[in-house]
Each structure stands twice: as structure tokens, then as C-alpha cells.
Image: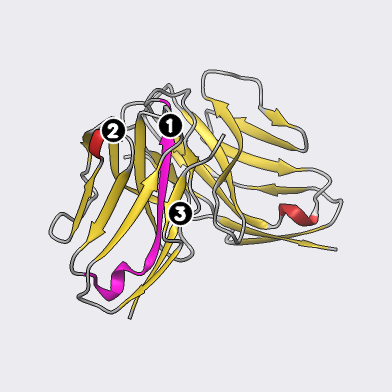
């Protein structure tokens, strides 16, 4: 079974440019997460989806970040405009549900460099 | 708010030896899960082991085991017979159902010397 797929794996852009990351979760996984991982730190949740609904976006900087999960499958995370401080790894994860027993499976991440 | 603390930024172990990574956490919840994740340089986060807070028995997975001390809010990972492939960043993480999100520690970078 395929794991969580993310693309691109690497992205270099100049500041003030827009950028988008794509995530395809494991088939059948209703819950999808986007995490931000700064260098040398643990991931932090940006947004969590239950099917199409964003149920926790309290940590998403809404002035420049947006996300969508159309049809409750694939998801896209967008930054516009990007800032130097956005350089980080953006991880996508998915799980069967939200309960305590549902393991989260992570994708390989997208490493963003803003110059 | 729940927090997870890993006080060892770096650890080193000789191949075939045993190493213990420390983790403490803070929560007022009684029901939760704790995890250890491994993140090799390729950056794919992989679950190593998990512990349910209501279980007194410590979880084990082959060469990996935990020492879960609920009262002390401590959750350490022991790696026995260390192998070169164990070299990675290890993250301790906490999950409470109310949030559905994992709260990670800062990570411990483990190196294995041949």
C-alpha cells in the first residue's frame, strides 16, 4: 500500500513569491494533517482536516497561509506571499480517524527555501 | 497546555551497545498516548513505539522498549543492540484525543559509532 505522497520534495523561491504544496494521503484515511518543522525542532501542527472540514486551523497564519482539501482526499497548502522565515519542512500526515488509537502516518515532507 | 521536553539534543552510542533517550511531558489529562518517532536524514517520520497511558506495562518492539513512569510524567526510550541504521533524529510525542494533534519534543539526534 502506498504511503503519504507529497510534492514537490524541494522548492526554492524568492521572498514575496507564492508557493503551493500538495499531499495525497493514504487511501481511506479521513484525517489529514499539515505540520511545520523548523530546522532542529519537532513538527508543529498547522491545520487538521476531518474529511473536507478544517477542524483545527488555530495555528495557521491566515494572513498568508491557506489550505484546502477538496473531496476529502488530496490537500494543498499555499503560502502567498512567502517570507524568509517560512523556510522549513512542511510535513503532511494522515490517519484513519481522530481517536487515540489512530496512528498518524507521515509523508517525506517538502523542504522550502525562501531566498 | 501540554508540553513535551527532550533534554538531550544529541546522544551517541557504540554499535551493539544500549542507549536511553529521555522525555518528559506535562499534561492534566488522564487518558493519552505517547510515541517515539524516528526521522532519518531522508526526513520520513516513522513510528518506533507507542504507549497507552492507561496501560501499566511498558511497551516493547523488538530492540526498542520504553520506561513509562506516569506519576513522574516520564517516557524514555531504550534501544538495545544499537545498529548503524538506528542513527537518526528521535522525537517524543504526545497525543490527547481532544486535540487530535501530536505535540512533539525538540528531538534527540542519535549517532551510532561503528
Q: Which residues are magenta?
A: A82-96
Q: Are marks 2 and 3 on the same chain?
A: yes
If you read the primary sequence from the N terminus, does the residue marked by circle 1 or circle 3 appear first?
A: 3
Q: Is residue B7 left or right of residue A68?
A: right
Tag nearer the camera, 1 or 3? 1
Secondary element at tag 1:
strand
Bin the neighbour count of mark 2 within 10 Å (Cα to Cα): few under 14, some 14-19, many 20 and up: some
Give me the C-alpha separation between circle 2 and circle 1.
13 Å
Give residue A42's mark.
3
**Where residue A96 appears, x then y in whole percent?**
42, 26
Q: Quadrant of residue B78?
A: top right
Q: Where is A25 relative to A19, above or below?
A: above
Q: Which residue is the site of mark 1?
A: A95
**Where residue B92 appears, x then y in whole percent?**
53, 44
Q: Is residue B68 left or right of residue B65?
A: left
Give me the C-alpha separation between circle 1 and circle 3.
19 Å
Front in this rendered view, residue B20 or B88: B88
Please report, as a chain letter, where disc 2 is located: A
Q: Which residue is the site of mark 2?
A: A72
If you read the primary sequence from the N terminus, does the residue marked by circle 2 or circle 1 appear first?
A: 2
Q: Where is A100 relative to A111, above or below?
A: above
Please report, as a chain letter, where disc 1 is located: A
Amino acid at each position: 500500500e502506498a504511503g503519504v505522497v507529497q510534492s514537490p520534495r524541494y522548492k526554492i523561491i524568492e521572498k514575496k513569491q507564492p508557493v503551493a504544496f500538495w499531499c495525497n494521503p493514504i487511501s481511506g484515511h479521513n484525517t489529514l494533517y499539515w505540520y511545520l518543522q523548523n530546522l532542529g525542532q519537532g513538527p508543529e501542527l498547522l491545520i487538521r482536516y476531518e474529511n473536507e472540514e478544517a477542524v483545527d486551523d488555530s495555528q495557521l497564519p491566515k494572513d498568508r497561509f491557506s489550505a484546502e482539501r477538496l473531496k476529502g482526499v488530496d490537500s494543498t497548502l499555499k503560502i502567498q506571499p512567502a517570507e524568509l522565515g517560512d523556510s522549513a519542512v512542511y510535513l503532511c500526515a494522515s490517519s484513519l480517524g481522530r481517536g487515540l488509537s489512530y496512528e498518524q502516518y507521515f509523508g517525506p515532507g517538502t523542504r522550502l527555501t525562501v531566498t | 497546555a501540554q508540553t513535551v521536553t527532550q533534554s538531550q539534543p544529541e546522544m551517541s552510542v557504540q554499535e551493539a551497545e544500549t542507549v536511553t533517550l529521555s522525555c518528559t511531558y506535562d499534561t492534566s489529562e488522564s487518558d493519552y498516548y505517547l510515541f517515539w518517532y524516528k526521522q532519518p536524514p531522508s526526513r520520513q517520520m516513522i513510528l518506533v513505539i507507542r504507549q497507552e497511558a492507561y496501560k501499566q506495562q511498558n511497551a516493547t518492539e523488538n530492540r526498542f522498549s520504553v520506561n513509562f513512569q506516569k506519576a513522574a510524567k516520564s517516557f524514555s526510550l531504550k534501544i538495545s543492540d544499537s545498529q548503524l541504521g538506528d542513527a537518526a533524529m528521535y522525537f517524543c510525542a504526545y497525543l490527547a484525543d481532544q486535540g487530535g494533534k501530536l505535540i512533539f519534543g525538540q528531538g534527540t539526534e542519535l549517532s551510532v559509532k561503528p
